[in-house]
């Protein structure tokens, strides 16, 4: 009886070890996706002016985007922000 239990335990642990080795590879089937440049906007909604775009900003305007980011980060800087 002990031998049968020991054999069962060994087989069960072997099955668990083999089950752990069957993980499927995690590959991207569609290939690499590249992000668009940040100042390209959110598509057609950026042209109409949504709640997520700054007033007066135009899609594709890199200089205006950089100025907006700089002003936004300065507003979060405790040493620069005015009271």
Image (cartoon, helix red, strand yellow):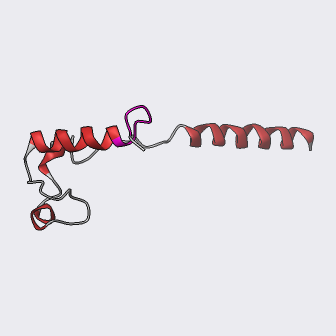
Most extreme residue toward the front, as rendered? Answer: 83
Quarter of the image holding residue 64?
top left
Horizontal side of residue 12 vs 33, given as left or right: right
Closer to us: 41 or 80:
80
Residue in the picture at 7% in, 46% down = 61
Residue in view at x 78 percent, y 43 percent: 8
- The verdict on residue 71 being magenta is no
Q: Is residue 59 visible?
A: yes
Front-most of 3 and 46? 46
Instruction: Tell how many labels.
Output: 0
- Where is residue 3? Give x, y as percent: 87, 38
24 or 31, which is in the foreground?
31
Examine the residues drawn in magenta and state their main secondary structure.
loop
Tell me the quarter of the image containing the N terminus. top right
Q: Nearer the viewer, residue 65 or 18?
A: 65
The residue located at (19%, 44%) in the rendering is 38
Q: Within the image, what quadrant is residue 39 found in?
A: top left
Left or right: 59, with 79 as reference point: left
Residue 10 appears at what percent x and percent y? 75, 37
Q: Quadrant of the C terminus?
A: top left
Residue ranking furthest to the top: 79
Could you tell me if residue 27 is visible in this image?
A: no
In the image, taking residue 68 as reference, residue 12 lies left or right, namely: right
Expressed as whole percent of the image width and height from the top left, the position of residue 77 reads 40, 36
Q: Could you say which quadrant of the image residue 63 lies in?
A: top left
Q: Residue at x 58, y 38 (%)?
A: 18
Image location (x, y in percent) of residue 41: 15, 53
Specify the segment rendered in magenta: 75-81
**Residue 76 painted magenta:** yes
Q: Is residue 67 left or right of residue 14?
A: left
């Amino acid at each position: 009886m002990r031998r049968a239990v020991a054999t069962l335990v060994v087989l069960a642990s072997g099955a668990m070890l083999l089950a752990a080795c069957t993980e499927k590879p995690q590959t991207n089937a569609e290939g690499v996706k590249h992000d668009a440049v940040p100042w390209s906007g959110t598509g057609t909604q950026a042209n109409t002016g949504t709640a997520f775009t700054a007033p007066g900003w135009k899609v594709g305007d890199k200089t205006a985007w950089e100025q907006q980011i700089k002003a936004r980060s300065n507003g979060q800087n405790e040493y620069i922000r005015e009271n």
